[in-house]
Image (cartoon, rainbow, N blue to C red):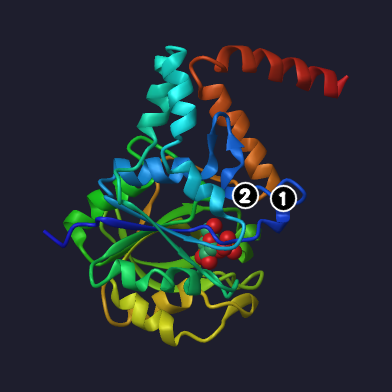
Amino acid sequence: MPKPIRKAVFPVAGLGTRFLPATKAVPKEMLTIVDKPVIQYAVDEALAAGIETLIFVTGRNKGVIEDHFDMAYELEATLRERNKASAMEILNAQLPTAGNALFTRQQAPLGLGHAVWCARDIVGDEPFAVLLPDMLMSGDPGALRQMVDVYNRSGGNIVSLSRCDPDETHQYGIVSKGEDFGTHFEITGMVEKPKAGTAPSNYYINGRYILDSKIMTLLGEQKAGAGGEIQLTDSMLTLMGQLPFFGTPFAGETYDCGSKLGFLRANIALGLKDSELGPELAEITKRLLAESQS
Ligand code: G1P
């Protein structure tokens, strides 16, 4: 059995410029999908996969993320006084174990690879997970759980994959497929945001990674790549020459909440799936559609 995956890194330093003015004072990770902030979905997914230590790489103006994962004494005291047991339960369910949520800062927006590298001392020398909270992964079991199940059999490094339209490959990290093992396949190459018409496949890295800690040394030496940023994909490509690398297609739905349309799609889709809100929301959606088409 390979070493267990106990730590997860959440890069949450991004400025969220695509969502201005909503993200002027509120971090994009705190925007709401139905009734939870985006970041909470990724944290819940990590905890369900057995992650013990949550490592947030934050930046300026992200303090509210820290507050979200802290106990809110005044709120709890008021809820207790008013006998709001179900609201208390919701709060308790999302509270990490004391000492298990750690925060470090990426001081300048130098890229995803640099953000992950900022967590190197906390990660230490054990394999770890990375979850990009913008990508909301809806599946049962969750995306990271699916990956951990593969990892326990295969070891090595693993990225979760989804498929996109061929004309969208320039937005993502794209992999080349090697030998197929059923639940996962060998990765023989990867490229960050390939130019139109040059992508080796339409399998894109959907924002979930299980990585050997050796990646941290490579990230420390990594030169800027696509977009002038230090890219995680570039260091993974180097690591691929040294250690096994697998891709596992995610069985579930991927919502890119970093784009306005993806964010709206996630709200509608998860709202429709919600047992309390779903039926009425379906009626509302139908009515709105009919109105917009008349
Ligand atoms: C990052 C990664 C990319 C991945 C994508 C998923 O890009 O660099 O490989 O496919 O996340 O969302 P970004 O969205 O930060 O540009």
Above or below residue 82? Residue 114 is: below
- The answer to whether any part of residue 267 appears in the image is yes
Q: Seen from this angle, which residue lies furthest right?
A: 294
Q: Position of residue 281 (x, y in %)?
A: 63, 17
In the figure, is residue 102 to the left or right of 35?
left
Q: Crowding at label 2, few (<14), some or many (≥20) Cα neighbours within 10 Å?
A: many
Question: Amino acid type of disc 2?
Answer: Lys
Q: Which residue is mark 1?
A: 19
In the figure, is residue 130 to the left or right of 78?
left
Residue visible at 35% across and 47% down? 46
Q: Position of residue 55 (x, y in %)?
A: 38, 58
Q: Which residue is mark 2?
A: 28
The numbered mark at residue 129 is none
Q: Position of residue 133 (x, y in %)?
A: 50, 51
Figure quarter occupied by ligand 1: bottom right
Q: CA distance from mark 2 to mark 1?
A: 7 Å
